[in-house]
Amino acid sequence: MEVLQTEYDIPDLRVGLFVTLIKGGQLRGCIGTFLEQPLDQNLQSMACAAAFNDHRFPVLKRDEFDELRIEVTLMSSAFPIKAEDVEVGRHGLIITMGHHKGVLLPQVAVDHRWDRSAFIEHTCIKAGLPAQAYTQSNCCIEAFEAVIVGEEN
């Protein structure tokens, strides 16, 4: 794979991140990792994955590049949280129960104007669980905080 040179100085950080691709105001790809690898490595691999490996969308084509808006969500480490302590707009969520796992970024709840309950329930649904699964004692709720960086085109 060709490594593109950049005109930007990328900080020497080890951080998990998600890359979100938006075309015409609609999601076009979003993939990330919680592995705290060097920023430049995670950024390159997740950008490629969002463009070419998000199974929800066809592979991105070259003629779409100019129409994209790109968001990079830099994430803190995840920490356990109680449902009543989740703050919409501040926290992203990870719901885990058995082999099921769902992740929603903080901006998803804001964009959809969800309240706390709706955010948690939609994260359960994303995990393939019933919406109320978070009320079960064997369901793990974790949160993370994020910094969102975006650039048009």
Image: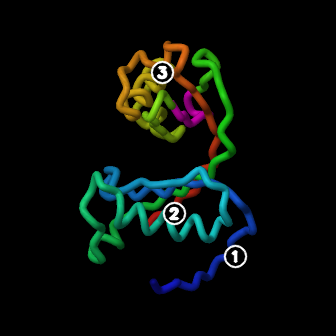
Query: x, y (%) of residue 68?
Result: 37, 64
From the viewer's perspective, is 65 left or right of 136? left
Crowd rating for badge 2 (residues with CA inside 10 Å; few <14, some 14–19, many 20+): few
Element type at mark 1? loop
Q: Which of these two is toward me, 63 or 56?
A: 56
First of labels 2, 3 by sequence position: 3
First of labels 2, 1 by sequence position: 1
Residue, disc 2 = 151
Residue 9 bears which disc, if any? 1
Q: Is residue 98 magenta?
A: no
| Mark 2 vs mark 3, CA separation in Å | 28 Å
Crowd rating for badge 3 (residues with CA inside 10 Å; few <14, some 14–19, many 20+): some
52 is higher (above) or lower (below) than 105: below
Residue 115 bears which disc, if any? 3
Q: Residue at x 35, y 62 (%)?
A: 53
Q: Is residue 92 magenta?
A: yes
> Magenta span covers which residues?
88-95
* Pair 2/3: label in front: 3
> For the C terminus, which image quadrant?
bottom left
Query: x, y (%) of residue 45?
Result: 51, 68
Q: Main secondary structure of the magenta part?
A: strand
Q: Residue at x 38, y 34 (%)?
A: 126
Residue 38 bears which disc, if any? none
> Mark 1 is on which residue type?
Asp
